[in-house]
Image (tube, rainbow, N blue to C red):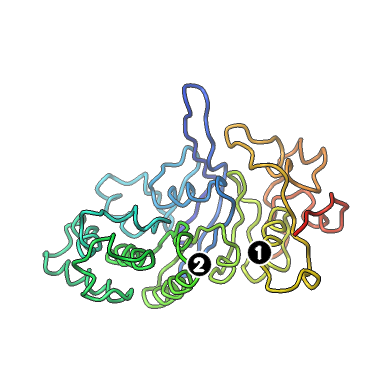
Amino acid sequence: MPIIAAQNVSVRFPVGRRKVLTAVDDVSISVRRGETFGLIGESGSGKSTLGRAIVCLERPSEGRVLHEGANPYEMSRRQMREHRRQYQIVFQDPAAALNPRMTILKSVREPLDAASKGTPEERNAIALEMMARVGLGEAFAGLYPHQLSGGQKQRACIARVLTLRPSLIVCDEAVAALDVSIQADILNLLAELQQEFGLTYLFITHNISVVEHISDTIAVMYLGRIVEIAPAERLAKDYLHPYTQALLSAEPVALPSSMRPDRRIVLEGELPSPMNPPSGCRFRTRCRYADDHCATETPPLRELAPGHFSACHYAETFRTRPGQEEGGE
């Protein structure tokens, strides 16, 4: 049984009196215990909203999210409050996630205080233990967020979610705001913690090189829908969706332009509005291979190889079909 299963989940937000923004549209994914499931897409694709729905910060408008087979919204309020502690989230901006008026020790201890777990002395001990585990010694306990670097603040946020010993952590662009060298340190720390505590990660990012490095499975999201799901080692070589192809082509390669295997594909136009998405295939307005079929029929998410799904009418053949000229580098 997967630790997380999103089944036909849609999340909609009212905009004004008559309009509706569909941030997530009929998405189904499952995450196995102990794996790192990567979720990638452009800003505005709905990946953060899906992550928030998975940890019950956004209630699905349709569909359901199951935690090890249980629907948290069928629980009593008290049961759900206890249950949700197993499903935590680390946000993109660690400065905004920490209370500037609280010391780092108090911020890390805050979930234990909210849960009324143990005595104050026991909570302090657990908080200090988790701070030490993420590389923040006792010298950081009395400091305030403005006295820490970005990487140190994110370590404090990670320590805070660990105090409740969660089963799953959603990392929502958790390294996006950090320098590249600091990103590597945080990614290595997350990998160590996963082994030590048996954690499962849903790792949300727009950086395909990061998600390829740490993930077991990757889902590609575009305008509220999943367009491709594949094992990480397979996706880079055997992608089956034009949007994935464009994302991969944008990844920096440390080679002269003449030696790069593919030219960069520059997508024309902006991401369409989720309040008025294109008919048929959501990606068709920016796709080099789109035709009338793509405009009239929504492509289903089909399994074309073991564990490899694509939502493209021409998934098997698009790389051999004539398309528009690729953009420059």
Q: Which residue is mark 2?
A: 36
| Towards the viewer: 131 or 318 | 131
Residue visible at 78% across and 62% down?
263
Residue visible at 77% across and 57% down?
328
Residue visible at 68% across and 70% down?
253
| C-alpha span from label 2 to label 1 | 21 Å
Horizontal placement of 307 versus 115: left or right? Answer: right
Q: Secondary structure at mark 2?
A: strand
Which dot marks residue 141? none
| Towards the viewer: 178 or 12 | 178
In the image, residue 316 above or below residue 278:
below
- Mark 1 belongs to which amino acid? Glu
How packed mark 1 is, by other alpha carbons closer than 10 Å (few <14, some 14-19, many 20 or more), is few
- The x and y percentages for residue 57 are 38, 47
Horizontal placement of 265 versus 59: left or right? Answer: right
| Towards the viewer: 136 or 226 | 136
- The x and y percentages for residue 171 are 44, 60
Please identify the quarter of the rendering in which residue 217 is found. Answer: bottom right
- Mark 2 belongs to which amino acid? Thr
Q: Which residue is mark 1?
A: 251
In this view, the mark in front (2 or 1): 1
How packed mark 2 is, by other alpha carbons closer than 10 Å (few <14, some 14-19, many 20 or more), is many
- The x and y percentages for residue 246 are 71, 56
Please identify the quarter of the rendering in which residue 282 is found. Answer: top right
